[in-house]
Image (cartoon, grey):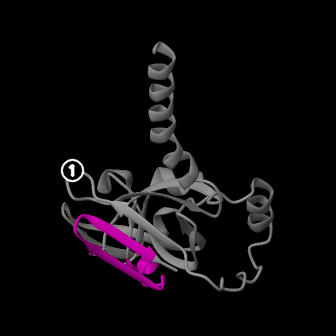
Amino acid sequence: MRSIFFFVALALVIAGIMPKVMSNVGNAPAPDAAVRRAATPAAAPPAQPTSYRTVVVRGDARGQYQVEGSIEGRRMDFIVDTGATVVALRERDAARLGIHPVPRDYTSNVSTANGTIKAAPVRLSSLEVGGIRVFDVQALVLPDRALSDNLLGMSFLSKVRRFEMANGRLVMEQ
């Protein structure tokens, strides 16, 4: 009887863990491929896949959609913001990517909840979320004090085949 309870408990633990493990299978690019892409930024984007990739994100308690992405192979967290025209990066996260705007690069005026601030326009060669990769993405670098989280804006979302926010879920398809 004791072995049956042990087996049932083990099966329940495995059933709880496996969806998380399996959802990440095949999503991460090979490390050497990311290095090759970074070394050859002028390479043409790969051919479009014949089947669609779908990513579903559930909203958090505040109704925000938090996603883990990668820019040119480097992991980065974002909050999806359909009100943001472009992807917005904090200075410290842009620096991790090797993007270091100088004061004269801050040429764009951006309206935020905290008022108007200067931002530095940049182009990202690729941005990926859950296996959906978009190339040549317009972005802005904002001072850390102006932005608490990186924002995944419309310069990414408008390049996916379809995105929809409904019933506490964000669905993106490419």
Answer few, some or many: residues within 10 Å of disc 1's Cα (few below 14, many 20 plus, some between 14 and 19): few
Residue occupying the far top of the picture: 2
Q: Using residue 71 as the reference point, say whether residue 87 is left or right of it.
A: left
- Pinpoint residue 122: horizontal percent, then vertical percent: 52, 73
- Pinpoint residue 59: horizontal percent, then vertical percent: 28, 58
Reply above or below: 120 against 28. Answer: below
Q: Which residue is mark 1?
A: 61
Q: As shown in the figure, which amino acid type bears the numbered disc 1?
A: Ala
Q: Using residue 89 as the reference point, say whether residue 174 is left or right of it.
A: right
What is the span of residues highlighted in magenta in the rendered image? 154-172
Q: Is residue 157 magenta?
A: yes
- Pinpoint residue 82: horizontal percent, then vertical percent: 30, 75
Q: Using residue 173 as the reference point, say whether residue 154 is left or right of it.
A: left
Residue at (27%, 53%) from the top-left corner? 60
Residue at (44%, 21%) from the top-left corner? 5
Reply above or below: 100 against 61. Answer: below
- Pinpoint residue 61: horizontal percent, then vertical percent: 21, 50
Q: Is residue 58 magenta?
A: no
118 or 16: nearer the viewer: 16
SS of the residue at dot 1?
Answer: loop
37 or 138: nearer the viewer: 37
Reply above or below: 13 against 79. Answer: above
Image quadrant assignment for residue 46: bottom right
Reply above or below: 134 against 35. Answer: below
Quadrant of image for the N terminus: top left
Residue at (45%, 26%) from the top-left corner? 9
Image quadrant assignment for residue 112: bottom left
